[in-house]
Image (cartoon, rainbow, N blue to C red):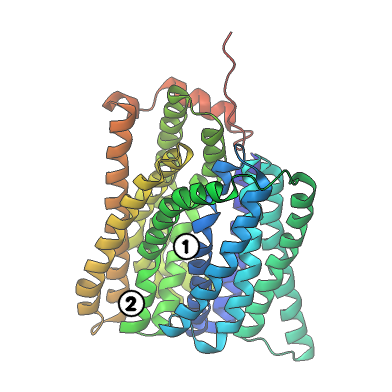
Amino acid sequence: MGTFFNRLLTTVIMFTVIIINTNQFGPEGTGTIAIVILGLTLLQVLSNFVGGSTLVYLTPQRDNLQLLLLSYAWMLISTSAGVCLLDFFHLVPHEFILFTFVTSIILNVYFIHLGIIQGKEDIKLYNILQLTQAVLLILLLGITLFLHHHFGWAVHIRIYLRLYLISFLVPCVISCFYIRRHVNFINFDNVWKLFGEMVKLGCWTQLANLAQLLTYRTNYFLIQRFINDKALGIYDLGNKISEAVLIIPKSICVVEYARISNCQEADYTKRITLSLLKVVFVIILIAVLVLWLLPASFFGFIFGPEYAESKPVINSLLPGIVSLSCLSILSHYFSGHGKFYINAIGSFIGLAVTLALGFTWLSGTSKGDPVHALQVAGHISSIAYSCTFVYTLICFIIRTKAVLHDFLITKEDLILLKENLSSISIFKRKERP
């Protein structure tokens, strides 16, 4: 159960970091951190227009060195242009622009390497690198807090962001050694043809990811614009708590995508996708019910009294989290088959819903009770996620000719779950006699 427990442990560590940050920096400070991290995520999406998940799809089929060098070159260009845009539109505070640029370079190199590693199906190393980053961050933060309490060292947002940078730098260096050993020079024949293929595939993939990210996070910019950073900090916490249950589908999708990319047999990919979809749906329903039952006082006790107001945000996001969990399984099915445009269209549908409701419903309620406005932001996200899921589900049904009976849990699904529960990161195709 390597992938799932790795993600579970990573999530526990990151929630520990969140608890420390909320108590150390308060809602306004965590709101600023959220905006900077969002800026880094946007730059990562731009970099992945040539690279990213396209690397996973192309690594088993194309010259790996060419893939790597083309990804590096585009990353430098896109990051430089992206930072200028973030500064021009004041999406990231100006005092953090240089940090954003340097950190983005390191993060994007790291994620390019992860794409190659995942494409080679070295899931063990993939898990180790991600866990290393989380462990380093909590260790460095713990040491910093120790020095703060015993020797009076200052702890502020800039210190945390520097620790965040270092936590990615170490696994990035480790990944470089893997790349050096497993990626060999062959030639530069047809390099421009490969670049065109990467752009064609990556364009659809990253348009989908960009639209998806904006669907997830446009509310951040709207809340900062219409309300304030404090409200954003409260919303950010509620959003992160709700999204925590996504470790279940995400840990499955890592391997689902790699397996489907390496096996295009229609019957097998349809069967494994449907089984995973049903299993994820049931598990997510249980997880969502647990979150719904937790009282507001619980969140206030753990994260600080001001964060008790995150509870209405969490409740409003829960229906969307169910849709998002199921969507992740279906979207990775289409990505594994190279049908990136389907995910892109679905993501743009969600983005259109978010923008339409954000500039009408959310802006109209922002003048009143901030807690109610944040709850409205959560409802908007849930509606957008659900619209994207419905569209993607329709496309899946049309492509696979699935019928109602296929979506009912069967004995075969339970057998598949039992077989893979002890090793959820390994979905092996059974050999036919």
Task: Name the foreground residue: 163 vs 110.
Answer: 110
Residue at 70% across, 74% down? 141
Q: Position of residue 375 (x, y in %)?
A: 30, 69
Q: Residue 56: x, y in percent?
A: 57, 45
Mark 1–mark 2 Cα distance, whole angstroms, equals 20 Å
119 shown above or below 349: above
In the displayed structure, would residue 73 be above or below residue 90?
above
Element type where label 1 sits in the image: helix
Residue linked to disc 1: 241
Sequence-wise first label, 1 or 2: 2
Quadrant of image for the N terminus? top right
- Measured along the vertical axis of the image, is residue 51 above or below residue 146? above
> Where does label 2 land, which residue?
222
Q: Identify the residue at image location x=31%, y=40%.
A: 393
What SS does tag 2 mark?
A: helix
Q: Mark 2 packing: few (<14 Cα in 10 Å), some, or many (20+)?
A: some
Q: What residue type is labelled 2?
A: Leu
Q: In which quarter of the image is residue 136?
A: bottom right
Q: Measured from the top left, where is residue 315 in percent x and y?
A: 34, 61
